[in-house]
Image: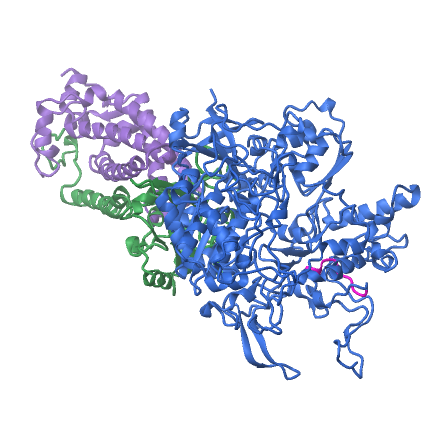
Chain colours: A purple, B green, C blue
């Protein structure tokens, strides 16, 4: 118990995450104008619509690769679901309660796992539909039409979840961001949010 | 929209497939020739191209008695009243409607997203080497100068009749013609008088904006925007009602020891 | 055209046969549409279901080359069912004439008319003559009942053309035949009119002239000539081919359809005597009786002051044919191949693709010392020496290429099929070094003249004596450019001297001199031309086109007083602005129109003329101002260009028989002519015995079992020299194709789009197969006959488009005109492995 901090994400993981994050925001900003004419002002960030499309296309490639890598990196953690995770789900992580019951989460709680799985699947689908939308002439019209719909739908979900993600990792749960910025979290943070993991790393 | 919506009546029964419309269009719009290959039909090119805004389809058939029919149909942008291409176009002004009701494009403003390609119920817009939208614009430049569209000017048999849409429709109805596109999609700017069912000409029986496109633009888009703001609102509400999860050590934790 | 394009809208029935106006005259097709709008029925008869057929109410398939059988059946139907216009036939045709007793017809003579000389391959027409009374007047039976009358002979002749037999020859289903006959026959009612539109589909056969004759008979029987919405209408294949024919394009006619003299007519007097018809028929205007005025005015126009009464107005300088020698298209290349010509001008033409049996034509060009080609673009003719299969090192022909201006790059008149001479101004300047034809000709004239002056030569007179006042003369006496208005005025003609009005015999001389015309004035009408050398006219038919009132051809008035679309103030039509020829046949003997709602002209008996006389024609310019025929003193018969004043149902002047008779094309798919023992037209010009290896035919030959025909497509023009150089048009029709039925394709294992080889006895081409429902096998003579078709607008000079279909067609000429038979010949098709 000498150190104040516990390592949560190594450097490679952090770099990868911020690649995903940066490309995501590129895609968001360049995609908003494509999503609706209401947001066409965002095109100006890229020097116009064509720039936005270009950024969206190549940002998409970066996002697709980095996001999938991130997903695969954590795939093992994502797909292990135990009794505690089920409890978490039942109480929705206690977020809708002023006095949540104690949940003994591992390195990632159930919400984070589900979020990760969604990220993986959505990345895959957005990537596929993205390619179809990129070269619509090469696909049957019906496929492209459905692809446009799916891309838009996933985009909406993605953004909604991202708002929640940002909230929960910043002001929602103070101290969380540190892990992604510096790699270390405070011991108290680890003990509070991920007691099972804390025990594992500290050997308690 | 316009004081008077202008448009075409295409009377297929008058067409002799001379294709003066195809060539006149190329001449006026300075469009390059397409390199074509003879594949066993007069119908060349076999599809609209970035350099071909309108073309004649040749449809050959015979009934059980061996009586041959050779139908000709002018394929082009029909300037829908409710235009799928305009609905999906994210670039303001790239596809817009003139005061005559004509759907025209502006290459300067097109951002090459190609959404219009998929949104068109008639599969009309094409993208060329410059990656910009092209399609029939009904020679809005000529119309503006009081001239007929180039194709109509060249048409020797009055197959392509240009004028006020209502007047053309009234005249055709008076002559007992079966019309296509009178009311679909808030009325097509190019109304056809057909000799056979629309499917024979490769036209959708009831043209509409593709369902996926409708769902995307008319359902997902508004609901999505609701969703964005909803999400933002939800976290704000959460923050002020439940607040942030403080750590135990700080001693201010409102919640239990952990939520995980 | 006897009528004109716009007049098609006035028809009740339109028969499209031997033409394909939707594809080859698309702009004019609007008038067919207009007729349809007015309720007209359109019939299309064609071996292939064409774009014209797509707009027809009735489509009748027909095996190529059997039109006379088809039409003969119609004549029979009209006669048997009394659909003809009795009054018209009796008064305005020669149906009532009695033919000599020795005249025999194919029904009795195994397919020949009497007088055939097998050795010469020609008819002696003596027995075809009419019976004449002691006063030299033709004997007639106006009741049309005399068995020797033309009418009864015709009935007998065509009684052989029963629907079953016709169907068996043509391959047209019998029910379709009868439907066509019935609908077209309905125009025999006096108040209905039917028009016929034909083009090369009728002319380019060994029986080409007789195809048109057969239809003429039908139109006369139905009273359809001279009326609005009627007539026999040749749809010309080039915008100005009517004009060039009017102005002496063909080897045997001078401008204005004056015969080219032959060497056995050494003096003008002899010429005039031979070519001026005489008649004893009452009431016949016999307009060709004026021939001497026209030939003299023509000579005065071309030789000017050099043409005097003393030197026969320069008649001796006119080039002459040797008697009996034919210098038509096919003969030119036949003689060229035999080495008879040194040089050749291919001016505005591409014979290496357009000539029938183009392989022979290309070979012939190798035998020239020099050739000048004048054209817009380099082409298969100009570059024949480097064509496929030609060893350039062995070709000694020196080729000169003179770039010519396109029609839009020069000013002048263009005469359309309806005889309207329309003046055009130049839209753009000629490109590069190209020049208008007139200026190329102008240069040539002055250079040749200078050379004659410097070096002398054999008989320079015809050239050096030509007048050439077409523009500003420089100090050296030459002109650099041509004022095309001066040419137009010369064509119209002038008064060379004051011409006084002469008193009629018995009338006292007028107190004051009045003039027909004064010296230097442009002539106002060919009626004013003189035979004494006091007038000039380069082409009497065009006299009036450019007169003292101005350039009539440039008029653009849009008045249409009759409502028939005659537009008398729009441009100018020959003759004398008459829009519908033979219009005096559109009225009855009293001048009352047969078609009251579509009256071309009518006799207004109450109109008061200056001088107090009563009565004049209203409407179109009549065929002569005389009162109607009912006026026995002054009235004239309507067909004023015929010596006897009536139209010819019986044509004793033709080379191959006074009635059209069905003969098979020179190359045909069946062993015997079902109509008679005579297989082919006995008077047609065949080249097979000329000893040239290029001239081979293959009739009923198992190696070439399929009928073939050639045609044009909308998208290309003629041999394609113009259109193949327009990428937009090449995009529409990129290369040679061959159309065939599904049945034939199945038999030959050919799929749509396959490359196939089409071969005739003379050559072969590679073409893409268009397997179509629009060609159907024909049931002919109890068997099945397949037909295929190819366009002839391509050639090797344009890369990747394929070769000329004329490599397949034969050298064989129509008996009367020598037009080649390109519309019916035999081929084989096979898939290219």
Q: Is residue C535 magenta?
A: yes
Residue C319 visible in the picture: yes
Could you tell me residue A2's position as x and y percent?
21, 19
User: Residue at 50% across / 23% down in the picture?
Assistant: C703
Q: Is residue C795 magenta?
A: no
Could you tell me residue B147's position as x and y percent?
50, 60
Closer to the camera in the image, B213 or B29: B29
Secondary structure mainly formed by the magenta segment: loop
Residue C51 visible in the picture: no
Left or right, residue C453 beside residue C493 = right
In the picture, residue C273 is in which quadrant? bottom right
Could you tell me residue A157's position as x and y percent?
23, 38
Left or right, residue B48 beside residue C609 = left
B221 shown above or below C579: above
User: Residue at 62% across / 32% down in the picture?
Assistant: C358
| Quadrant of the frame with the C terminus of chain B | top left
User: Residue at 9% across / 24% down in the picture?
Assistant: A84
A127 shown above or below B79: above
C507 shown above or below C761: below
Closer to the camera in the image, A104 or C411: C411
Which residues lie in the magenta part?
Answer: C534-541
Could you tell me residue C72's position as x and y percent?
47, 47
Left or right, residue A165 beside residue C210 = left
Closer to the camera in the image, C248 or A43: C248
**What count of labels does the image hold?**
0
């Amino acid at each position: 118990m000498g150190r104040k901090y516990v390592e949560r994400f190594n450097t490679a993981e952090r770099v990868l995450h911020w690649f995903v994050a940066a490309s995501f925001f590129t895609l968001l900003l360049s995609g908003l104008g494509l999503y609706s004419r209401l947001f066409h002002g965002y095109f100006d960030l890229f020097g116009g619509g064509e720039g936005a499309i270009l950024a969206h296309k190549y940002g998409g490639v970066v996002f697709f690769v980095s996001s999938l890598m991130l997903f695969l990196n954590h795939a093992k953690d994502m797909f292990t679901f135990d009794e505690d995770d089920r409890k978490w789900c039942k109480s929705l992580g206690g977020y809708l309660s002023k006095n949540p019951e104690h949940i003994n989460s591992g390195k990632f709680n159930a919400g984070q796992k589900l979020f990760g799985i969604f990220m993986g699947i959505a990345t895959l689908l957005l990537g596929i539909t993205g390619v179809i939308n990129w070269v619509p002439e090469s696909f049957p019209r019906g496929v492209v039409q459905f692809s446009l719909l799916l891309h838009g739908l996933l985009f909406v979900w993605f953004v909604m979840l991202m708002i929640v993600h940002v909230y929960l990792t910043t002001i929602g749960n103070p101290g969380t961001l540190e892990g992604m910025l510096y790699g270390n979290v405070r011991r108290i943070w680890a003990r509070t949010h991920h007691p099972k993991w804390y025990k594992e790393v500290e050997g308690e | 929209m316009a004081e008077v919506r202008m448009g075409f009546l295409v009377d297929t029964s008058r067409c002799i497939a001379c294709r003066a419309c195809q060539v006149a269009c190329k001449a006026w719009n300075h469009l390059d020739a397409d390199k074509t290959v003879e594949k066993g039909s007069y119908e060349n090119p076999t599809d609209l191209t970035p350099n071909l805004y309108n073309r004649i389809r040749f449809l050959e058939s015979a009934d059980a008695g061996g009586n041959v029919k050779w139908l000709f149909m002018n394929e082009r942008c029909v300037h829908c009243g409710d235009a799928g291409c305009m609905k999906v176009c994210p670039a303001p002004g790239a596809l817009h409607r003139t005061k005559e009701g004509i759907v025209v494009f502006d290459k300067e403003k097109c951002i090459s997203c190609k959404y219009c390609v998929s949104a068109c119920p008639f599969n009309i817009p094409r993208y060329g080497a410059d990656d910009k939208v092209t399609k029939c614009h009904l020679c809005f430049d000529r119309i503006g100068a009081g001239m007929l569209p180039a194709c109509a000017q060249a048409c020797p048999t009055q197959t392509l009749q240009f004028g006020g849409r209502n007047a053309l429709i009234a005249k055709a109805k008076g002559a007992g013609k079966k019309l296509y596109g009178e009311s679909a999609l808030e009325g097509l700017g190019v109304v056809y008088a057909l000799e056979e069912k629309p499917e024979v000409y490769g036209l959708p029986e009831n043209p509409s904006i593709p369902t996926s496109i409708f769902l995307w633009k008319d359902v997902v888009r508004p609901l999505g925007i609701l969703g964005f703001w909803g999400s933002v609102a939800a976290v704000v509400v959460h923050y002020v009602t439940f607040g942030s999860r403080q750590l135990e050590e700080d001693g201010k934790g409102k919640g239990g020891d952990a939520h995980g | 055209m006897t009528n004109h394009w716009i007049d098609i809208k006035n028809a009740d029935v339109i028969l499209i046969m031997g033409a394909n106006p939707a594809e080859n005259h698309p702009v004019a097709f609007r008038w067919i549409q207009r007729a349809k709008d007015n309720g007209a029925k359109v019939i299309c008869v064609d071996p292939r279901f064409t774009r014209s057929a797509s707009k027809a109410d009735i489509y009748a398939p027909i095996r190529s080359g059997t039109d006379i059988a088809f039409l003969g059946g119609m004549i029979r139907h009209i006669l048997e069912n009394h659909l003809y216009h009795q009054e018209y036939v009796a008064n305005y045709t020669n149906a009532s004439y009695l033919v000599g007793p020795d005249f025999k017809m194919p029904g009795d003579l195994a397919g020949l008319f009497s007088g055939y000389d097998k050795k010469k391959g020609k008819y002696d027409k003596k027995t075809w003559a009419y019976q004449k009374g002691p006063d030299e007047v033709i004997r007639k039976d106006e009741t049309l009942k005399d068995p020797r009358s033309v009418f009864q002979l015709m009935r007998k002749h065509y009684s052989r053309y029963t629907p079953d037999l016709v169907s068996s020859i043509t391959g047209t289903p019998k029910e379709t035949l009868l439907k066509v006959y019935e609908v077209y026959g309905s125009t025999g009612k006096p108040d209905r009119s039917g028009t016929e539109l034909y083009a090369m589909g009728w002319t380019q056969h060994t029986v080409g002239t007789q195809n048109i004759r057969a239809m003429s008979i039908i139109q006369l029987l139905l009273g359809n000539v001279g009326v609005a919405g009627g007539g026999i209408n040749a749809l010309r294949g080039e915008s100005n081919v009517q004009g060039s024919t009017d102005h002496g394009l063909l080897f045997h006619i001078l401008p204005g359809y004056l015969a080219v003299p032959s060497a056995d007519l050494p003096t003008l007097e002899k010429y005039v005597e031979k070519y001026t018809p005489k008649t004893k028929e009452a009431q016949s205007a016999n307009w060709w009786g004026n021939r001497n005025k026209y030939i003299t005015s023509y000579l005065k126009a071309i030789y000017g002051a050099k043409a005097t009464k003393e030197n026969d107005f320069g008649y001796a300088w006119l080039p002459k044919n040797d008697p009996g020698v034919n210098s038509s298209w096919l003969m030119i290349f036949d003689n060229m191949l035999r080495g008879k010509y040194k040089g050749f001008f291919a001016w505005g033409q591409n014979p290496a693709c357009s000539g029938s049996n183009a392989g022979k034509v290309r070979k012939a060009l190798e035998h020239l010392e020099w050739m000048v080609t004048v054209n817009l673009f380099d082409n298969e003719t100009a570059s024949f020496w480097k064509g496929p299969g030609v060893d350039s090192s062995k070709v000694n022909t020196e080729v000169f290429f003179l770039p010519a201006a396109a029609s839009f790059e020069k000013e002048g008149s263009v005469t359309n099929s309806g005889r309207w001479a329309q003046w055009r101004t130049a839209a753009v300047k000629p490109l590069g070094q190209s020049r208008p034809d007139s200026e190329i000709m102008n240069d040539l004239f002055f250079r040749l003249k200078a050379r004659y002056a410097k070096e002398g030569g054999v008989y320079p007179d015809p050239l050096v004596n030509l007048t050439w006042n077409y523009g500003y003369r420089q100090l050296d006496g030459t002109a650099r450019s041509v004022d095309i208005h001066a040419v137009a005025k010369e064509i119209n003609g002038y008064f060379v001297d004051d011409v006084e009005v002469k008193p009629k015999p018995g009338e006292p001389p007028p107190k004051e001199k009045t003039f027909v015309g004064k010296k230097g004035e442009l002539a106002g009408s060919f009626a004013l031309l003189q035979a004494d050398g006091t007038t000039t006219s380069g082409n009497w038919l065009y006299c009036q086109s450019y007169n003292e009132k101005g350039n009539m051809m440039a008029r653009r008035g849009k008045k249409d007083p009759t409502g028939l679309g005659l537009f008398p103030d729009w441009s100018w039509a020959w003759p004398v602005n008459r829009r519908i020829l033979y219009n005096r046949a559109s009225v009855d003997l009293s001048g009352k129109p047969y078609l009251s709602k579509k009256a071309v002209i009518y006799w207004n008996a109450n109109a008061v003329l200056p001088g107090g006389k009563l009565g004049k024609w209203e409407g179109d310019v009549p065929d002569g101002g005389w009162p109607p025929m009912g006026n026995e003193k002054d009235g004239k018969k309507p067909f004023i260009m015929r010596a006897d004043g009536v139209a010819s149902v019986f044509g004793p002047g033709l080379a191959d028989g006074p009635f059209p008779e069905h003969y098979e094309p020179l190359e045909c798919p069946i062993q015997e002519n079902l109509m008679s023992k005579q297989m082919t037209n006995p008077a047609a010009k065949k080249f097979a015995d000329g000893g040239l290896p290029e001239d081979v035919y293959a009739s009923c030959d198992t190696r070439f079992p399929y009928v073939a025909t050639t045609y044009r497509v909308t998208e290309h023009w003629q041999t394609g020299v113009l259109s193949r150089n327009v990428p937009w048009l090449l995009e529409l029709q990129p290369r040679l194709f061959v159309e065939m039925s599904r049945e034939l394709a199945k038999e030959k294992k050919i799929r749509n789009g396959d490359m196939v080889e089409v071969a005739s006895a003379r050559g072969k081409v590679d073409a893409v197969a268009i397997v179509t429902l629009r060609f159907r096998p024909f049931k002919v003579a109890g068997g099945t006959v397949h037909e295929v078709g190819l366009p002839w607008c391509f050639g090797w000079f344009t890369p990747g488009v394929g070769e000329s279909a004329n490599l397949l067609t034969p050298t064989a000429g129509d008996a009367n005109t020598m037009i080649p038979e390109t519309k019916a010949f035999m081929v084989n098709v096979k898939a290219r492995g």
